[in-house]
Image (cartoon, rainbow, N blue to C red):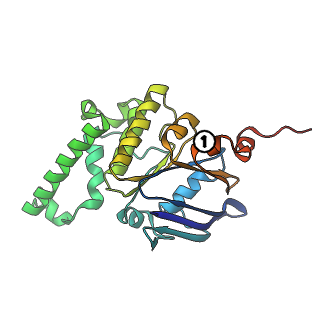
Amino acid sequence: MILQVANLSKHFGGVVAVDNLSFSVNKDEILGLIGPNGAGKSTVLNMINGAFRPTKGKIFFEGKDITGFPDHKVAKNGIGCNFQMSSLFMELPVIENIFIGFHMRYKTNLFERFLRFSSAVKEETAFRQEAEKMLVQLGMNSFRYELAKNLPYGYQRTLGVGLALITNPRLLLLDEPATGMNQNEINQMVELIKQIRQRGITIVVIEHNMEAVMKLCDRIVVLNFGQKIAEGTPKEIQGNESVIEAYLGKEID
């Protein structure tokens, strides 16, 4: 087990966004977090990645209590996140977007980098080489000098995933990575996520495209009104009456 969420709740004033939620994530698996709009899915991810502090409950990563850690500390502990809203530097080329992602991994300080100490130059060169490899892995080498704002939407989402990967996470949180994509772009994103898992990175993904979820996920947790209503394999979730009711409603006599 790499992640454990125990009795987690988040209140915004009188609104209960997440209510006493518990689930775990096994190492090397892809776990889907699904539910209708407003079910509390993004709030859960924002508590795990440190953007929101839980009202109550605990979050354990690799056995360590990280509850309430700020986002930068969560990232340094090995959790990467690709947000639903774009975190790209739109006025910079693709290669520079990737390179900026290394800022958390520098061991040389700003003074040493400014004065071009040999240790700083060596570190920067290594990061440049890694950025080049990342572009190839993302299938975006031909866009290296294109401004991020000029990329097709699907490639912007892919670049966002690349920025999260630069932090060398052991757990990657993806918030609707395929939103707004056409079918071809969705298929490419599904394959990219599978390749990321093959690198030994565990993944938690929020996604509304059920075809993508069923192709990707080993297990699925379903939320509705901030509470867990089902958990199981894709096949089990497809036939779960509570899940069907949450998405489609139920017939009233």
* Relative side of 76 to 175, left or right: left
* Relative side of 55 to 149, left or right: right
- Residue found at x 26% / y 60%: 105
Query: In the rendered structure, which amino acid carries the disc numbered 1?
Result: Lys
Seen from the viewer's position, the closer of residues 246 and 118 is: 246
- Residue labelled with disc 1: 235
Q: How many marks?
A: 1
Seen from the viewer's position, the closer of residues 109 and 61 is: 61
- Residue found at x 72% / y 41%: 244
Seen from the viewer's position, the closer of residues 114 and 174 is: 174
- Residue found at x 73% / y 47%: 242
Measured as percent of width and height from the top left, residue 201 is found at 37, 53
Q: Callout 1 environment at 10 Å: few (<14), some (14 to 19), or many (20+)?
A: few
SS type, badge 1: helix
Residue sitting farthest toward the left: 118
Measured as percent of width and height from the top left, residue 21 is found at 63, 62
* One can see residue 170 in this view: yes
